[in-house]
Image (cartoon, rainbow, N blue to C red):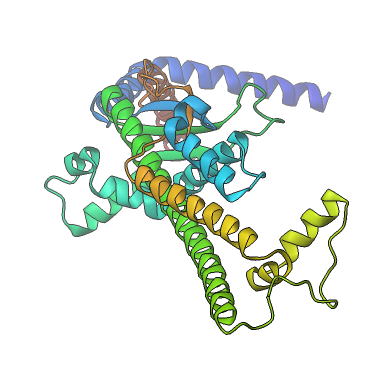
Amino acid sequence: MANSELAKNDEIDLIDLIKILWKKKLTVILSAFLFTIVAAIYAFTAKEKWTSTTEVIEPTIVDMGAYGNAKLRFAQISKLPDITIDTISKSLYAKFDRLAFSLNERRNFFAQSDEYKGLIQDQDEKGKRKILSDLITEDTAVVRPDPKKNTDMFGNRITFSAQTPENAQETLTQFIDFINEKAFELDKNEFQMEIAQQIDNLTNEKKEIEESLMVQKEQNKDDSKPLNVIPQSLPQTSSNSSSQSAQDSALDPAMALLVYGDDYSRMQLRIITGQINQLKALQNEVKGLKAQTYTYQASPSYPVQRDWPKRAILLIVGAVLGGIVGCAVVLVKFFLSSKE
């Protein structure tokens, strides 16, 4: 009986509240209207945000062009079988990937970008630092593919957000070009150092052979014991060609001269001289080469949908929030007046 009466009182109270709100509906409507106006002002004056997206993968043989061929020639001259088109592509892309994630490289790019220069007008030093920080960490994003989450994603996805769709697409394209240039410059410098090191190694080997030949020549003048006689303590030649090849590679120039004579040493000298000349020509050729360290899986997009502000959603939220605030004001005033 008591529960039934309590339920009846609750029902009456709820009906009374609805009647109160209905009587004060103008207050609720006015509150909703004011909040909607505020939301509309913000929605149509807030800075817009448009995001351009691209996806990049490892460069193809076409993207690497003559630079890839130069690396293959270096591998052939230096007898490095582990260097292939696939390893060259992976090496270039690894540098692109690393620099794209580098905050220092992003800072270097945005500090001289048109986007940054346009945003810092009339800003103090603190404001400029804030804008640069936002461009680096908030507006730019690089995401590596995750097979578990993104089955349709093959390469790194890079995005950039700006106040206009044109700026978003253009700045993202410039960022990709900047990272590509830095990554290729890094790889080319390393490649040139490898060529120079190989030339130095071959030059030293050439000098050792020349010195051995000079020593033999001097000894021959003195009618000394011929150096091309095989000492008993030295490795004996074998009829097995593969075994002899292994012995050849194990001998230094002086030992090879003792074992096989000056004809063999002169032949080695001609081979090494040819390798040095080829490497020097390659070294000069590489200086003028260009290559891409990536290829587009999807070019930088032109955004057709604004990320922010979502005007329709803001207007709806403003109207609903205004209505709630209006109802709260009416009910608070009613309960305060009823207590009095």
Q: Find residue 212 and report its image quarter.
A: bottom right
Rendered-image quadrant of the C terminus: top left
Horizontal side of residue 24 vs 215, given as left or right:
left
Q: Residue furthest left?
A: 122
User: At x 38% / y 22%, what residue is drawn?
Assistant: 310
Query: Where does residue 121 sit, x and y in percent of width and height?
Result: 13, 45
Q: Vertical placement of 57 versus 135: above or below?
A: above
Query: Where does residue 311 sit, x and y in percent of width and height?
Result: 35, 20
Q: Find residue 172 and report its image quarter.
A: top left
Query: Where does residue 183 sit, x and y in percent of width and height?
Result: 43, 45
Residue 131 in sight here: no
Query: Where does residue 300 sit, x and y in percent of width and height?
Result: 40, 24
User: At x 39% / y 46%, what residue is drawn?
Assistant: 281
Horizontal side of residue 249 vs 59, given as left or right:
right
Q: Nearer the viewer, residue 102 or 270?
A: 270
User: At x 34% / y 41%, what residue is drawn?
Assistant: 178
Residue 252 in sight here: yes
